[in-house]
Image: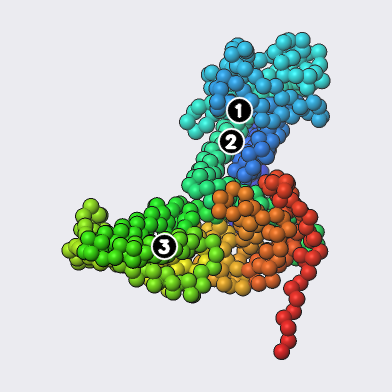
Amino acid sequence: MSRRVSRPLAELAERTRAIHTFDFSQSARVRSRVREIDDLGQALESMQGTIRNFLNIGLALVRERDVESLYARVLQETLDASQAGAGVLYLLDESAAHQLLPVGSRVAGGGQPILPCLLLEQYPDAALARALASGETSIERLAAASPALASFGPGLTALAGTDGVTLVAVPLKNRDGRAIGALALFVGEAASASHERIAFVEALSGLAAAMIDNQRLLAGQKGLLEAFIKLVAGAIDAKSPYTGGHCQRVPELTKMLARAACDANSGPFADFRLSGDEWEAIHIAAWLHDCGKVTTPEYVVDKATKLETLHDRIHEVRMRFEVLKRDADIDYWRGVAEGGEAMLLAAACDARKRELNDEFAFVAACNIGGEYLSPDKIERLQQIGARHWTRTLDDTLGISQDEARRKGARIPPPVAEALLADKPEHLFVRKEAEVHGEGNPWGFRLEIPEYKYNRGELHNLSVSRGTLTPEERYKINEHIVQTIIMLSQLPFPPHLKQVPEIAGGHHEKMDGTGYPLRLNGGQMSVPARMMAIADIFEALTAVDRPYKEGKTLSAALALMRGMRDGGHIDPDLFALFLTSGVYRRYAERYLRPEQIDEVDVARLLEPAPAPPQG
């Protein structure tokens, strides 16, 4: 037999002899070791399950974004893990650290919720107070008839029975180790407050405390942002009586229209819905839609007359007329002194004064800007402005360096000045940073006047409608440009990236003729189109504008129907605005009773008549 075959046979024989010589008296020890190994395996499997359960709970808590849902989830998971029959989740009142406020409770079997509010100073020796003071879990046995158990309300009656319950008070500590609340777990006789369960609950409570602390910090940041947003809006409204309350009412009206769209079961908005993040974006955008007005000078917004800047320059013009009238008197007395006919000279003086009075009255009427200024009136202004008066004082004394640069070379007096003039010092050059021309990074498409301001007297008095020059009108319209620029610079999180577009689109029009981007309806988001309607309706009906009366419902909606027919506002949203009754609910809340008249909704919904043929 070869050596290659004989070796395996020898090994087999050796193993056979080992089996026959095995001492089976040791088999009990083997079975014990096997059982130990099985128990260890089961323990490892249980530990893996516990870790897996802990990680799953942690992941669920991390994903929970609603604070109330987070409280409920923390309580539910803790009760399931501890097998407690009831529990209360407490948070320390931030305004009164000695008070525990319940934010959630649960009783096994759907019993009456436990929602006591506890003052720790009344129960200094209670388990909850000890847990908060020491930062360690505190366990206390509560007899069925004990006052401490009764303080938690009748919800524990069934659980306590006649034997009472065990209260396990677990402190909730934030990342700084400071107690922010506590978990009160009530364990009946059917379950035990074992060390293993308590250890798991403590680990879970640490994770829950971190999540709750994060949510509270986030809520605090949102609260601060909300307060700051309303602070800015309130400052804009307080800046000018012409806008008082506008920044507060437009958000309400925008959200009313958005809710109507979400509630629609048919029509263009049957499938329109907004997520919680989208509601937040609309809320912030609506409150900040006019934040750019902080850059608009108050005297431009409040310009009541054509010559008004920081003051009404009609007073300067009046003084020049007064000088010319004094010159008429001087000419009269000079003529008399030189032997002229007194009666003829007096008649000429009186006629000249009457003419000056009439001309000033005309200039003053043009300054009001209440009526259309026709070309013939503008021509008469030019003729009146061509009169001259004599200045004998140096007009470069006592002025700023900036104005001196605008004036140019000094002309020594006496100088014959035009009664009404457009002078170099009236022109304010626009700084390069203020020019948002072609190729600007925001895509603005604007017709920009050559000058930032033109305070020329004839230039201002010749405005045909209203009181604003093209430069001033651009400055007012520029507030939406500044709104977009300001909001685009803020580091909004991803779910709020749409805020600048929503806030900056309320002056765009469906036909693409709006500003500052000249977007058409298809390029505008639905919330931006909603805000455009809200902004217009609020402006038409507002009663706190000193330059106009608030319109009635029927008058305001008739004007908006014209805007719809002219391609300015979304026809579907305007129809929803009417049919949902949003306009009337808003009116009942914000308008005066005399403004709320009957509205023929059916007539307003009728399409515009077709233009005549031929």
Q: Residues within 10 Å of mark 2 (few under 14, many from 20)?
A: many
Q: Are marks 1 and 2 in contact (CB under 8 Å)?
A: yes
Q: Earlier in the sequence, mark 1 or mark 3?
A: 1
Q: Nearest to the eye among marks 3 and 2: give it.
A: 3
Q: Earlier in the sequence, mark 3 or mark 2?
A: 2
Q: Position of residue 18 (x, y in %)?
A: 63, 39
Q: Which residue occupies the extreme bottom position in the image?
A: 614
Q: Helix or strand or loop: what does disc 3 sit on?
A: helix
Is residue 238 in sight in this rendering?
A: yes
Q: Residue at x 66, y 15 (%)?
A: 140
**Residue 454 falls left or right of residue 2:** left
Q: Which mark is residue 101?
A: none
Residue that badge 2 annotates: 212
Quarter in which the N terminus is drawn: bottom right
* Colour pattern of the rendering: rainbow
Q: Position of residue 167 (x, y in %)?
A: 68, 19
Look at label 3 and name its amino acid.
Arg
Q: Helix or strand or loop: what does disc 1 sit on?
A: strand
Residue that badge 3 annotates: 354
Q: Are marks 3 and 2 in contact (CB under 8 Å)?
A: no
Look at label 2 and name its amino acid.
Ile
Residue that badge 1 annotates: 91
Above or below 481: residue 512: below
Q: Earlier in the sequence, mark 1 or mark 2?
A: 1
Q: CA distance from mark 1 to mark 2?
A: 9 Å
Q: CA distance from mark 1 to mark 3?
A: 83 Å
Quarter in which the C terminus is drawn: bottom right
Look at label 1 and name its amino acid.
Leu
